[in-house]
Image (tube, rainbow, N blue to C red):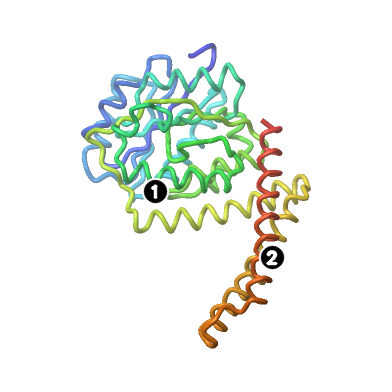
Amino acid sequence: MYRTKRIAVVVPAMNEEILLPLTLKGIPDYVDRIIVIDDGSTDKTPAIVNDFMKNSDKITLIRHEVNQGLGQSLIDGYVKSLEDAEIDYTAVMAGDNQMHPDDLKVLLEAIIIRNLDYVKGNRLLQPDVFEKMPRYRLLGNSLLTILTKFATGYYYIMDPQCGYTVIKNTALAKIPIRKMKKGFGYNADILCMLNIQGCKVDDVEIRPIYGQEKSKIKLRKYIPEVSALLIRLFFRRLWKRYIVRDFNPLVLFYGFGFFLFFFVVIPLLVRFFVLFNRYGQAPQTTLIILVFIFSFSFQSMLFAIWMDMDYNKRRQ
């Protein structure tokens, strides 16, 4: 137990025969239950877990005969944790030994003492992150951080791709966790669910660790898939949070801004270039109307963003 709270740790793993033993050995003794999800491994990962289970009754193994994605592994781990009514908090530590076990205490201190519903790690605040994190990951993470802020409503959250998290099981029981994204992008999906339920979320500084692990993310597939997901989450949050659960006029400003941009600004922009190409000079009237309407659209969306940020800040 940690501060009289029972802790479970979900460990998703796929073909981690080299690093999984280090991960399991590093999990602190105060953890009450370890749930390992073998996501269709073809190496010795299942056998390694079985060997650990012989010496510890804390460990439970859930096997996927075929790979189902990281999101599905976490869903199964979360559901298994919820089945144990004595568990108070559920953490996630990847099986590639990329999450320092000492940082689990930092996450637990934050969520328990501050009475949060969900807390996640933030590697971007470390002064040496530029040296430890590969540049392409750092750039992609920074861009996705900005997009995720809009999609989830947690504008103060950074490093949304960090999977080192702890969730209170009472909050976990409130959200439709079985509907969470099965593949990559689950991070933003669960944050969006928590925002809709009005849960208190924050992140804490943890250390970035990069060593022998190999990223399973394929950027060509990952970037468009996650971008499309974030757009869907944005509109889902607006609908469920500000229309279904609690009406807020910010949706009108968002709607007005989007309408002007897609149905007025873009057609005017097309007309501008058609006339410019035909007559060889900029059509002044079209240009004036275009700038005027674009300003209205931009200001409307800025005002909606400000209202959205203020609303979520007050709820926290």
Residue lying furthest top in this view?
Answer: 3
- Residue 155 quadrant: top right
Pick the residue in front: 290 or 127.
290
Residue at position x 54%, y 16% in the image: 5
Residue 54 position within the rendered picture, expressed as x and y whole percent measured from the top left: 29, 23
Residue 171 position within the rendered picture, expressed as x and y whole percent measured from the top left: 61, 32
User: Which tag is nearer the camera, tag 2 or tag 1?
Assistant: 2
- Crowd band around label 1 with a 10 angstrom C-alpha radius: few (<14), some (14–19), many (20+): some
The disc label shown at residue 69, or none: 1
- Residue 292 quadrant: bottom right
Residue lying furthest bottom in this view?
Answer: 278
Residue 196 position within the rendered picture, expressed as x and y whole percent measured from the top left: 66, 42
Q: Is residue 16 left or right of residue 138?
A: left
Quadrant location, the C terminus: top right
- Crowd band around label 2 with a 10 angstrom C-alpha radius: few (<14), some (14–19), many (20+): few
- Residue 135 quadrant: top left
Q: Is residue 228 above or below residue 131?
A: below
Residue at position x 71%, y 39% in the image: 311
Residue 63 position within the rendered picture, expressed as x and y whole percent measured from the top left: 36, 41
Q: Is residue 79 left or right of residue 209?
A: right
Q: Is residue 61 above or below residue 106?
A: below
Pick the residue in front: 151 or 136.
136
Q: Is residue 291 left or right of residue 249?
A: left
Q: CA distance from mark 2 to mark 1?
A: 47 Å
Amino acid beneath label 2: Phe
Numbered label tally: 2
Secondary structure of the residue carrying numbered label 1: loop
Amino acid beneath label 1: Gly
Q: Along the polypeptide, which appears first: circle 2 or circle 1?
A: 1
Mark 2 = which residue? 292
Q: Is residue 203 above or below residue 55?
A: below
